[in-house]
Structure formats: C-alpha cells, structure tokens
Amino acid sequence: MFDQLPKYPNDFFRYGGDYRYSYELSNKEVNQLIKKAMDTMLSNIECETISVSKGDTKVMVKKGELEGDYFIEIYKGYYSEFISFR
C-alpha cells in the first residue's frame, strides 16, 4: 500500500513555486491569516488545531498543553499532495 505514496518533490504541488497558480503574500496578508486563525480558535473552545491558507502561505495554530498557550506556525512556499487508499 505504501509503495503508492507520492515522491517528493516531483509529485507535490509547491505553493509559491509557480505564481501562475499561486502568489506571494505580503506580511500584512500573513498577519491577517494569523488573526483569522486565532479568531476562529478562540471562538470555538472545542477546536484543537486550525489551518488557513492563501496564496503561497499556510498558517497553522495549535493549542498548547496549558490553557491559553498556542503554537503558531507559518509555512511559506509549502508543498502538498492528496492521496487516497480507497
């Protein structure tokens, strides 16, 4: 089953690698994504992790072990691919 896994980097789409399909976000736009993710996280107490993306950037926010602690991760020019084992 795992012999069907995509091979990095050829089988993955690189956000920001080809700006015909994606574009580079400004720092202001990245900060807007951070705010959007945090607003969603804080308004939904059940939420443990959230990610939002736009252009060449993905923002992920995860709850920390202590209440009120959060990890914010920024991915610029990230890669992704979808696979199904159906």
Image: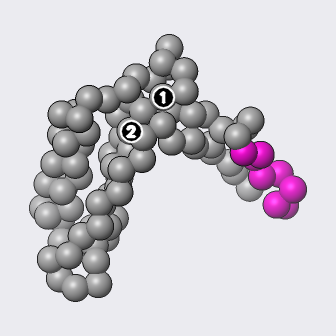
Tell me where residue 47 appears, x and y as whole percent: 27, 67
Give the image quarter of residue 11.
top right
- For residue 3, side relative to residue 78 (left or right): right
Please report the residue visible at 35 percent of the width from the left and 57 percent of the height from the top: 73
| 24 versus 77 height, above or below | above
Which quarter of the figure is the N terminus placed in? bottom right
Mark 2: which secondary structure?
strand
Please report the residue visible at 87 percent of the width from the left and 56 percent of the height from the top: 3
Indicate which disc residue 16 carries.
Answer: 1
Give the image quarter of residue 28.
top left
Please report the residue visible at 18 percent of the width from the left and 56 percent of the height from the top: 38
Give the image quarter of residue 14.
top right
Tell me where residue 80 appears, x and y as whole percent: 58, 43
- For residue 37, side relative to residue 5 (left or right): left
Indicate which disc residue 70 carries.
Answer: none
- The three-letter amino acid code for the residue at tag 1 is Gly
Neighbor class of circle 1 (other Cα within 10 Å; few <14, some 14-19, many 20+) is some
Q: Which residues are magenta?
A: 1-8
Residue beneath disc 2:
57
- The three-letter amino acid code for the residue at tag 2 is Thr
The reply to whether dot 2 and dot 1 touch (C-beta < 8 Å) is yes
Neighbor class of circle 2 (other Cα within 10 Å; few <14, some 14-19, many 20+) is many
